[in-house]
Image (cartoon, rainbow, N blue to C red):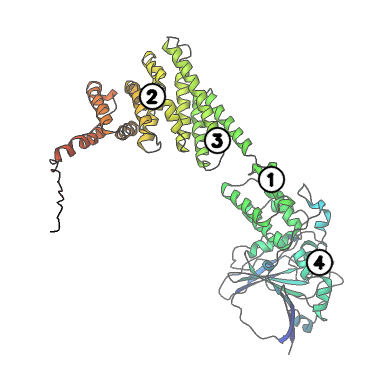
């Protein structure tokens, strides 16, 4: 009875056992790749072929299941669609002179030598020399191969079986010389001294089994790259996700040329939005900063590009964008960019990208320009009166940013104290001044929604300073401002008034009641707030009972007789 030598490799010890081969049913599906759909692997390795890349050999795989159609595996792609008929096989190349056909006894011993291990158990440390840094080319030694065909059963000396975690098993024919030359992982396992000790006179090919592969297809593509001279050209046919898989396998088996080629691809190829996070995450996981990963990450990280913390430079860039928007001349473009910058700052509001002082500095500049042009217009100098609406619009935009970042209380205090601006309000034509009242309206909405928490004195001062000018401009705001949400502003004003003490509420609502009856649509309708004040002021008062008489407690001293 024929016997086989089974060798198991672990990180701690090496055990060699000799036992008879027994028929064993495999639980996983097994795919065997051979040079044709019907041929059986024969012969041992005799290195003499001249092909340069795996594309030169016609290779097909047949899925060994009774009911399923065959699965074709070609040299260009590991997987093809199931075929109803086996694809025609190109005629094999003439065998070399030194090749001889083994006898039946030798063929039976081909599976007698096995190396079982999982590459995930030992992750090689990347050991790159100065000549293998990320550049336009690789070290010539990285591609030194004898030109053996990938998956050629006649010329190969290793039968490699890859098993996935879900039970799929695929076998390919590879060459020890190529694996050892390109992979430090295989170089350790398949060293000349070790394999000679383990072979014990056997002349058949090694049978290497790798289990628990994350993706068998990607693993095969990585092995196929070892047979190619131009890895970059080969990778150009793949997408980013596939290259990331190849990079992960290449790093795991110490395939340095594959790692560098993948990094060069990732550095030059465009990424989709969902691929960006995958690239950054995998490179951080593999720790390839010293071999070119930093060049790839420069695309998405300023810190990686400069090697230092550039928080100050980030703020400088953002402030520049802020001022460009504030000073832009095309109004349509300004509106679009204000929305874009606000969106970007809102998404990044958790980071210290813009200091509060920087935002308020820009705000103060706009307020000073507004005051300058407003007072000129009040003195009947209307040459630059259009700047009033422009600077008021800038203040409104900055106020949105401050409220979104919950730092707008100081702006509320500043705006509430602009009594000089309020006093000159009636002297400026309404067509120029109504944009100023939009700033006041935004503050009302912020207070009414709880986005601004200020003292009652500041809230009352805001209403005293700006409520009457706001009433005067409301009709123009309603007609001239596109996209103005009237009901939102009216609710904000009502809620702002209702936050004040009841006596102040009464004064404001009674004044509004008289104005609304005389202005109609040109006055904001805050009827809902008026009803709340009414219930607070009169409903409880009419329901109150007479106060009870005080209870007099008399303590009588009882003397002991």
Dot 1 or dot 2, earlier in sequence: 1
> From mark 3 to mark 4, how far is it between C-alphas?
61 Å
Q: How crowded is mark 2: few (under 14 residues within 10 Å), some or many (20 or more)?
A: many
Residue 456 visible in this rendered orientation of the protein: yes
In this picture, is 19 found above or below 476? Answer: below
Checking the image for residue 96, the label placed there is none
Name the spot of residue 311 as percent of width and height, x first: 62, 39
- Is residue 203 visible in the rendered image? The answer is no
Neighbourhood count class around disc 4 (C-alpha, 10 Å): few under 14, some 14–19, many 20 upward:
many
Task: Specify which label sits upstream in the sequence, 3 or 4.
Answer: 4
Residue picked out by circle 3: 355
- Taking the image as shown, residue 428 lies to the left or right of residue 81, namely left
Q: Mark 4 points at which residue?
A: 177
Quadrant of image for the N terminus: bottom right
Q: Mark 1 points at which residue?
A: 268
CA distance for labels 3 and 2 = 27 Å
SS class, disc 3: loop
Q: Residue at label 2? A: 437
Label 4, label 2: how many angstroms apart (C-alpha)?
81 Å
> Looking at the image, is mark 1 or mark 3 nearer the viewer?
3
Q: Which is in the foreground here, disc 3 or disc 4?
A: 3
Q: Position of residue 296 (x, y in %)?
A: 68, 47
Helix, strand or loop for disc 2 = helix
Cα separation, mark 1 vs mark 4, equals 32 Å
């Amino acid at each position: 009875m024929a016997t086989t030598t089974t060798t198991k490799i672990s990180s701690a010890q090496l055990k060699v056992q000799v036992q008879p081969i027994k028929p064993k049913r495999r639980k996983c599906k097994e795919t065997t790749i051979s040079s044709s759909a019907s041929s059986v692997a024969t012969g041992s390795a005799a290195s003499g072929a001249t092909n340069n890349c795996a594309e030169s050999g016609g290779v097909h795989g047949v899925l060994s299941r009774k009911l399923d159609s065959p699965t074709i595996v070609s040299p260009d792609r590991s997987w093809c669609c199931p075929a109803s008929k086996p694809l025609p096989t190109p005629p094999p190349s003439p065998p070399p002179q030194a090749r001889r056909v083994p006898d039946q006894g030798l063929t039976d011993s081909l599976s007698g030598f096995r190396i079982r291990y999982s590459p995930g158990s030992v992750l090689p440390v990347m050991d790159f020399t100065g000549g293998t840094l990320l550049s336009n080319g690789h070290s010539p030694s990285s591609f030194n191969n004898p030109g053996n065909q990938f998956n050629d059963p006649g010329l190969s000396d290793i039968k490699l079986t890859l098993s996935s975690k879900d039970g799929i098993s695929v076998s390919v024919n590879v060459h020890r010389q190529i694996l050892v030359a390109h992979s430090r992982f295989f170089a350790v396992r398949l060293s000349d001294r070790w394999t000679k000790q383990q072979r014990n006179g056997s002349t058949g090919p090694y049978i290497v089994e790798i289990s628990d592969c994350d993706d068998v297809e990607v693993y095969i593509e990585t092995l196929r790259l070892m047979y190619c001279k131009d890895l970059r050209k080969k990778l150009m046919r793949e997408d980013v996700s596939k290259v990331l898989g190849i990079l992960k396998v290449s790093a795991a088996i110490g395939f340095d040329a594959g790692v560098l080629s993948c990094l060069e691809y990732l550095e030059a190829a465009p990424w989709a939005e969902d691929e960006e996070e995958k690239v950054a995450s995998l490179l951080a996981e593999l720790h390839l900063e010293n071999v070119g990963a930093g060049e790839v990450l420069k695309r998405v990280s300023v810190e990686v590009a400069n090697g230092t913390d550039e928080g100050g430079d980030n703020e400088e860039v953002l402030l520049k964008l802020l001022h460009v928007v504030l000073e832009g001349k095309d109004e349509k473009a300004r509106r679009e960019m204000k929305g874009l910058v606000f969106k970007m700052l809102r998404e990044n509001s958790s980071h210290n990208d813009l200091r509060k002082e920087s935002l308020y500095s820009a705000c103060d500049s706009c307020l000073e320009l507004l005051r300058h042009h407003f007072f000129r217009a009040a003195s009947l100098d209307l040459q630059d009166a259009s700047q009033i609406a422009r600077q008021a619009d800038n203040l409104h935009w900055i106020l949105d940013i401050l409220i979104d970042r919950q730092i707008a209380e100081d702006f509320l205090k500043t705006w509430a104290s602009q009594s000089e601006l309020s006093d000159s309000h009636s002297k400026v034509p309404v067509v120029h001044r109504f944009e100023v009242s939009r700033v006041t309206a935004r503050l009302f909405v912020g207070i009414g929604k709880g986005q601004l928490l200020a003292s009652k004195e500041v809230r009352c001062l805001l209403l005293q300073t700006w409520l009457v000018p706001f009433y005067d401009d409301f009709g123009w705001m309603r007609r001239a401002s596109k996209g103005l949400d009237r009901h939102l502003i009216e609710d904000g004003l009502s809620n702002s008034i209702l936050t004040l003490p009841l006596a102040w509420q009464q004064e404001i609502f009674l004044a509004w009641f008289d104005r609304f009856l005389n202005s109609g649509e040109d006055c904001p309708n805050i009827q809902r707030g008026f009803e709340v004040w009414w219930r607070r002021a009169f409903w409880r008062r009419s329901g109150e009972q007479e106060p009870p008489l005080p209870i007099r407690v008399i303590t009588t001293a009882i003397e002991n007789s």
